[in-house]
C-alpha cells in the first residue's frame, strides 16, 4: 500500500495548456494553415504585399497542386565571324547539374523568364550573354572571338511527340531544333541580329 501511495505521488501530473501554448497555436493557424489552405484552394496569394520569402513558404507547401502543361529547354548559340551560328554546349559552360538533366544555366534562364521584371530581365540576359562571349574566348584561345551570342528556348506541350521521348529524358540537341520553334530571349550585341 505504501508503494502504491509513493508511486502515485511521484507520477507526473498531466500537463495543462498555458496561455503561451494557446498563443502559439493561434499564430500557427492564422499565419501558416489559413494562408496555406487559401493558396491550395484558390492558387492565389492571400496577401501579395507579403515579403517574397513568406509567399515562397506558402508556395513550397503547395507543390504539385496543378499539372504542368508545358516545359522548356534553354539553349545558347554563338555567331562565328563567318556568319554561322554554332551551339554553345552546356557541358562547357554550365557543367553543374543540380537536378537531373537541368544545368544551372537552365535554372537561371528559366527563373529569369518567369520571375523578373522586363527591365531586370533584359539586364540579366545581357550580362549572361557577355559572360558567354568571355567564356568562349577563355575556352578557345586560338579561335577568333564570337561576334554575338543568342539565347533562346523551345517550349513543348506535355503529351506531344517531342515531349514523350522514350527512355532517359534529355533535351533535344540544339542542331535539331527547327528555327520556327526557337523563341529568342536575346541576341547580344543587338546589332548582330
Image (cartoon, rainbow, N blue to C red):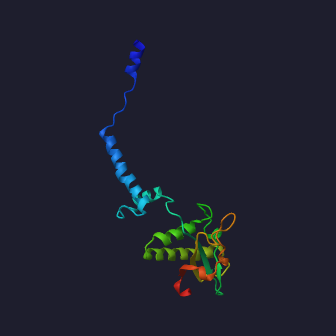
Quarter of the image for the C terminus: give it.
bottom right
**With respect to residue 70, does 36 lie above or below?**
above
Which residue shows up at 53% across the image and 69% down it? Answer: 110
Is residue 145 in view?
A: no
In this view of the protein, which residue sits in the foreground, 103 or 163?
163
Which residue shows up at 52% across the image and 84% down it? Answer: 190
**With respect to residue 27, does 85 lie above or below?**
below
Residue at the farthest top position = 1
Residue 161 image point, x, y percent = 65, 72
The quadrant where residue 180 appears: bottom right
Q: Taking 136 as reference, is 190 left or right?
A: left
Which residue shows up at 46% across the image and 69% down it? Answer: 115
Residue 123 image point, x, y percent = 47, 76
Is residue 84 in view?
A: yes
In this view of the protein, which residue sits in the foreground, 35 or 153?
35
Q: Taking 116 as reference, is 156 left or right?
A: right
In this view of the protein, which residue sits in the foreground, 34 or 140?
34
Residue 8 image point, x, y percent = 39, 20
Amino acid at each position: 500500500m505504501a508503494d502504491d501511495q509513493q508511486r502515485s505521488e511521484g507520477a507526473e501530473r498531466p500537463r495543462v495548456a498555458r496561455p503561451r501554448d494557446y498563443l502559439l497555436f493561434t499564430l500557427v493557424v492564422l499565419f501558416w494553415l489559413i494562408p496555406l489552405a487559401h493558396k491550395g484552394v484558390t492558387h492565389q496569394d492571400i496577401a501579395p504585399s507579403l515579403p517574397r520569402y513568406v509567399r515562397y513558404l506558402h508556395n513550397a507547401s503547395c507543390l504539385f497542386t496543378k499539372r504542368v502543361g508545358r516545359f522548356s529547354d534553354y539553349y545558347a548559340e554563338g555567331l562565328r565571324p563567318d556568319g554561322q551560328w554554332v551551339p554553345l554546349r552546356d557541358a562547357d559552360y554550365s557543367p553543374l547539374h543540380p537536378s537531373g538533366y537541368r544545368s544551372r544555366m537552365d535554372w537561371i534562364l528559366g527563373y529569369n523568364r518567369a520571375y523578373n521584371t522586363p527591365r531586370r530581365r533584359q539586364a540579366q540576359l545581357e550580362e549572361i550573354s557577355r559572360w558567354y562571349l568571355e567564356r568562349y574566348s577563355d575556352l578557345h584561345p586560338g579561335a577568333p572571338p564570337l561576334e554575338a551570342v543568342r539565347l533562346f528556348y523551345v517550349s513543348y506541350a506535355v503529351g506531344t511527340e517531342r515531349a514523350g521521348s522514350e527512355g532517359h529524358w534529355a533535351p533535344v540537341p540544339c542542331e535539331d531544333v527547327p528555327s520556327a520553334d526557337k523563341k529568342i530571349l536575346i541576341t547580344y550585341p543587338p546589332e548582330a541580329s
